[in-house]
Amino acid sequence: MWKWEAEGDAKAVIVMVHGAMEHHRRYGWLIEMWRSSGFHVVMGDLPGQGMTTRSNRGHIDSFDEYIFEVKDWIQAAYRYELPVFLLGHSMGGLISIRMMQEQRLNIAGVILSSPCLGLIHTPSKISEFLSYGLNVIFPTLRMDSGLTIQMATRNQDVIEADSNDTLYVTKVSVRWYRELAGAMKEAFLNLGKTQDIPLLVMQGGDDKIVNKVPVKEWFNHVPLSEKRFKEWPKCYHEIFNEPEREEVFEYAKDFVLSQLKAIGYIV
């Protein structure tokens, strides 16, 4: 876990959760945008990804490993004694959703960026069937993810940087996939258990990785007092890396500031 502190008095703390296969270093621009806007940022690498010490990269035994890890990051954010916001991208968005359903969080708002609630490219029926058996007898078997950075963003600078990124995970285990699929299912089954926290969902309109249809379906049915949905029509999956990312950031920051005003923290 790492912390980046705002210069001077901070307004709040942003806890960021990255997506599958990636790591915190890919969020340098976004971290600096929050920090320079007066927010502390707390972020780490999820188990089996980035700079974590696990030898078996791309593997988890249980999706709960992610939830427990992010809970530690939130606990660290509490120590600043400021309002805390949770920002989850893709699988990080799914982790955030499952936390809202399984934990009781003292946070001022949640931002979901293209949350992983359904996939554009799914395994064949045969592969899906076989994965259940392999999950029992050979759960650590790793396979190519089938995803490319070109599917994630139109930003050529990001594509070039990622092509030389040795921390990027390219293979995932059978157990990892089954846990991901299970978590997506649980996100819908536990809609009624979702903690009533102000929510902003932002979705890339031309997402090549996450299926935006179940994202809208989940959003429409989640029983929250305050929720906002924003689709960015031209954007691919990584909306905070897209050519429109400054506009995307300003929209997210406006949500955070509006929540701080609502609770009387800023005027």
Image (tube, rainbow, N blue to C red):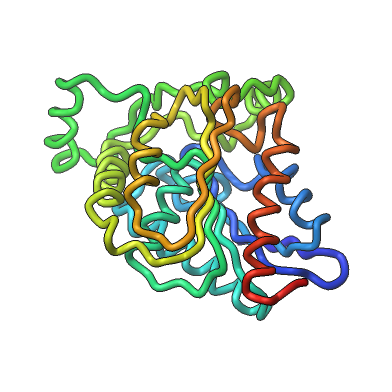
Horizontal and vertical percent position of residue 244: 71, 30
**Quadrant assignment for the N terminus:** bottom right
**Quadrant assignment for the C terminus:** bottom right
Q: Which residue is found at the position 72% from the left and 51% from the top?
A: 31
Q: Between 129 and 201, which is closer to the camera in this rendering?
A: 201
Q: Between 151 and 173, which is closer to the camera in this rendering?
A: 151
Q: Between 153 and 110, which is closer to the camera in this rendering?
A: 110
Count of numbered marks: 0
Horizontal and vertical percent position of residue 204: 54, 31
Q: Which residue is found at the position 29% from the left and 64% from the top?
A: 193
Rendered position, 246 above or below 82? above
Q: Is residue 111 left or right of residue 55?
A: right
Where residue 194 sits, quadrant-wise, is: bottom left
Horizontal and vertical percent position of residue 107: 53, 70
Considering every residue shown, the one lying at the far right of the view is 8
Horizontal and vertical percent position of residue 109: 55, 62
